[in-house]
């Protein structure tokens, strides 16, 4: 079995939120913990999280995830991808990239991306919902070198767009699972949809 991992990007500056949104509490838990828990429960490989200085995690995660520091998050999301890929480049054959401000992506979807990649031997397997596509997404190591060299706000979606010939996708059943939190209003909207998405709880 190839060495896969999950790489969670959590070093953003939260400019529109006004404070570190990932440290905000939602339903009694910090926002970042939702992505962490999904990645851990999916059980498709080691879990890494790219963080900025000052970002803290509960000690519960100390032995479950590996932290990777992005010292220059102001350089855009590509800097987090580059730092994260540099960390796993020699130890893993593939990775699934997750965004930590999409807290409701279920573990079952992360697992489905990996399983499709294994079945179809695809270089990329991305998430699709209606006309929307992108993260979370699986990438084989042959794309790592290019991902390390990206600059600015060019994210993983640009890698998908340039390589549709080597890509497959997994539909997610409800686009609300892909809610991203950019400002306090988004957090309020998420509160209204949580119960319908997770009537029995998040995990």
Image: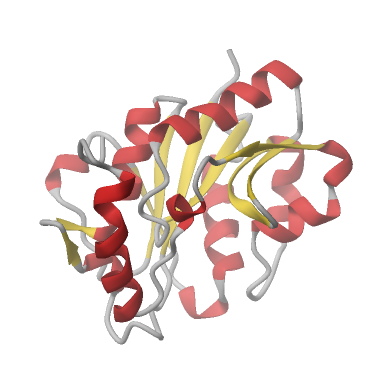
Q: Nearer the viewer, residue 134 or 192?
A: 192
Which percent across, then down, holds residue 85? 58, 48
Q: Nearer the viewer, residue 52 or 29?
A: 29
- Residue 93, picture quadrant: top right
Q: Nearer the viewer, residue 28 or 174?
A: 174
- Furthest toward the right, the residue is 165
Name the residue located 56 percent from the left edge and 78 percent from the top edge: 75
In the rendered image, which quarter contains the N terminus?
A: top right
- Residue 161, picture quadrant: bottom right
Any part of residue 148 in sight: no
Residue 12 drawn above or below residue 125 = below
Any part of residue 157 in sight: yes
Name the residue located 45 percent from the left edge and 27 percent from the top edge: 45
**Could you tell whether 94 is left or right of 104 in the image?**
right
Q: Nearer the viewer, residue 193 or 182?
A: 193
Which percent across, then down, holds residue 130? 66, 52
User: How many numbered circles does the render carry?
Assistant: 0
Residue 1 drawn above or below residue 137 = above
Name the residue located 29 percent from the left edge and 79 percent from the top edge: 184
Residue 54 drawn above or below residue 120 = below
Which percent across, then down, holds residue 128? 64, 47
Name the residue located 75 percent from the left edge and 20 percent from the top edge: 120
- Furthest toward the top, the residue is 1
Which percent across, then down, holds residue 43? 39, 25
In the rendered image, which quarter contains the C terminus?
A: top left
- Furthest toward the left, the residue is 28
**Could you tell whether 159 is left or right of 104 in the image?**
right
């Amino acid at each position: 079995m190839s060495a896969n991992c999950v790489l969670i990007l959590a070093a953003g500056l939260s400019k529109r939120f006004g404070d570190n949104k990932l440290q905000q509490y939602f339903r009694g838990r910090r926002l970042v913990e939702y992505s962490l828990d999904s990645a851990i429960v999916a059980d498709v490989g080691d879990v890494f999280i790219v963080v900025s200085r000052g970002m803290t995690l509960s000690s519960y995660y100390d032995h479950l995830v590996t932290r990777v520091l992005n010292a220059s998050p102001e350089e855009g999301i590509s800097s987090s991808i580059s730092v994260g890929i540099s960390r796993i480049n020699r130890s893993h054959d593939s990775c699934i990239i997750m965004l930590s401000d999409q807290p409701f992506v279920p573990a079952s979807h992360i697992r489905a991306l990996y399983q499709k990649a294994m079945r179809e031997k695809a270089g990329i397997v991305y998430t699709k919902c209606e006309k929307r596509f992108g993260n979370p997404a699986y990438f084989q190591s042959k794309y790592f070198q290019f991902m390390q060299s990206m600059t600015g706000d060019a994210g993983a979606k640009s890698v998908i767009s340039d390589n549709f010939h080597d890509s497959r996708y997994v539909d997610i059943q409800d686009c609300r699972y892909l809610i991203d939190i950019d400002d306090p209003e988004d957090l309020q909207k998420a509160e209204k949809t949580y119960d319908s998405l997770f009537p029995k709880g998040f995990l």
